[in-house]
Image (tube, rainbow, N blue to C red):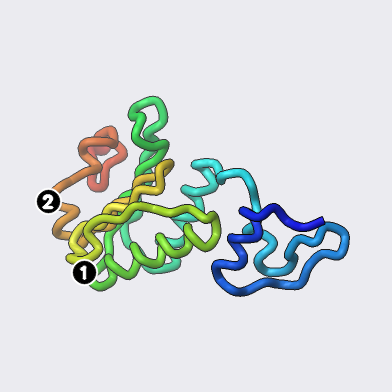
Amino acid sequence: MTPAPGRLARYLEDDVLSHSDPATGLPVGPRAARMTDADPTSEVLLARIIASLEDDKAEDIVQIDLRGRSDMADYMVICSGRSSRQVAAISEKLVDRLKQEFGRLSKIEGKETGDWVLIDTADVIVHVFRPEVREFYQLEKMWLPADQQRGGAKA
């Protein structure tokens, strides 16, 4: 039994195949976990995005549940990098990780300047800002209740 052509192509694009399982003929080993026909749920994607941002030392990570409030995505994530270079690096690494782990091609805008990078993964929208740009636009005020905002009103 040989793997379906589309499934095998995901492994060939990296030119790295692990050994094959004799029973199924499918690759096993480190890359076997990547092989799936189903898209990850938005919750799985969100968890991986948060982990990636934390790994790359993003600051003030805020996640916003958009389900039932917007049709554009299920979640929005807002975070900061300390410099334009870090904002661009955080964004680039996130897009690469989502492509490698889930085969997810994300749209990315603003990486060239590194002030505000928007990453659209379809299920999760990610905004990576320099702190002063984040403060200027204040996206959290548009999407979060006042008591959940950074420095929001205390009850």
- Classify residue 151 as left or right of residue 57: left
Q: Secondary structure at mark 2?
A: helix
Amino acid on which disc 1 is placed? Ser
Residue 155 shows up from this direction: no
Mark 2 to mark 1 CA distance (whole Å): 16 Å
Amino acid on which disc 2 is placed? Phe
Foreground pick, 24 / 111? 24
Residue at screen point 40% across, 43% down: 122
**Residue indicated by mark 1:** 84
Percent position (x, y) of residue 151? Answer: 23, 47
Question: Where 109 sits versus 125, above or below?
Answer: below
Residue mark closest to the camera, 2 vs 1: 1
Percent position (x, y) of residue 75? Answer: 40, 40
**Residue indicated by mark 2:** 136
Question: Where 124 sits versus 106, above or below?
Answer: above
Residue at screen point 16% across, 52% down: 135
Q: Secondary structure at mark 1?
A: helix
